[in-house]
Amino acid sequence: MNPVIHSITIDCTGDPYDLGLFWSALLGRPLADDDKPGDPEALIEDPAGGPRMLFVRVGEGKAVKNRVHLDLRPQGRTRAEEVERLIGLGATLVADHTRPDGRGWITLADPEGNEFCVERGELG
């Protein structure tokens, strides 16, 4: 049998709880009940059984572009609406790769500088 992805782990130099709160609001999933500010780790479970997201404090800062990142597809919102919502949560715009025909993606960064992309959803 082949392995399954259990966790997607994201390193941070700040408080993992704070970064977890950002991603919790982004994904609409709560942090684990026992997580609290100052903990060395914070966890978001996927109620559907998919990979969880684990935020871990590390000593070294991010120095280069991520080699792995998440591509998100909006649900019930357009890409533009989702990007506006995420910027309101604390994400920053890195680059807009939207093509004239609407395809493409927008690259954002979370409060720790980790890049992720927002693709076009079913509403555009």
Image (tube, helix red, strand yellow):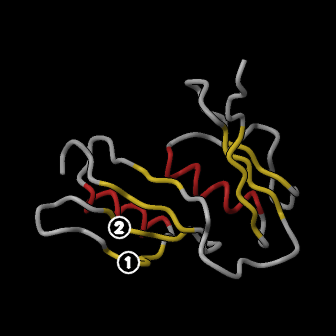
Say what amino acid the circle numbered 1 marks: Ala
Q: Position of residue 112 (x, y in %)?
A: 65, 72
Residue 60 drawn above or below residue 48: below
The answer to which quarter of the image holds residue 106 is bottom left
Q: Which residue is under mark 2?
A: 106
Taking the view exactly as shown, the residue that stands out farthest to the top is 1
- The quadrant of the picture occupied by the N terminus is top right
Instruction: Indicate the secondary structure of the residue bearing disc 1.
Output: strand
Q: In the picture shown, does residue 64 fall above or below 78?
A: below
Q: Which residue is mark 1?
A: 95
Question: Disc 2 on helix, strand or loop?
Answer: strand
Q: Amino acid at mark 2?
A: Ile
> Mark 1–mark 2 contact, CB under 8 Å?
yes
Q: Residue furthest left?
A: 101
Q: Looking at the image, which residue is at 53% across and 51% down?
A: 25
Q: Residues within 10 Å of mark 2 (few under 14, many from 20)?
A: many
Is 88 situated left or right of 3 in this image? Answer: left
Question: Mark 1 to mark 2: distance in Å?
Answer: 6 Å
Residue 122, horizontal then vertical, whole percent:
22, 42
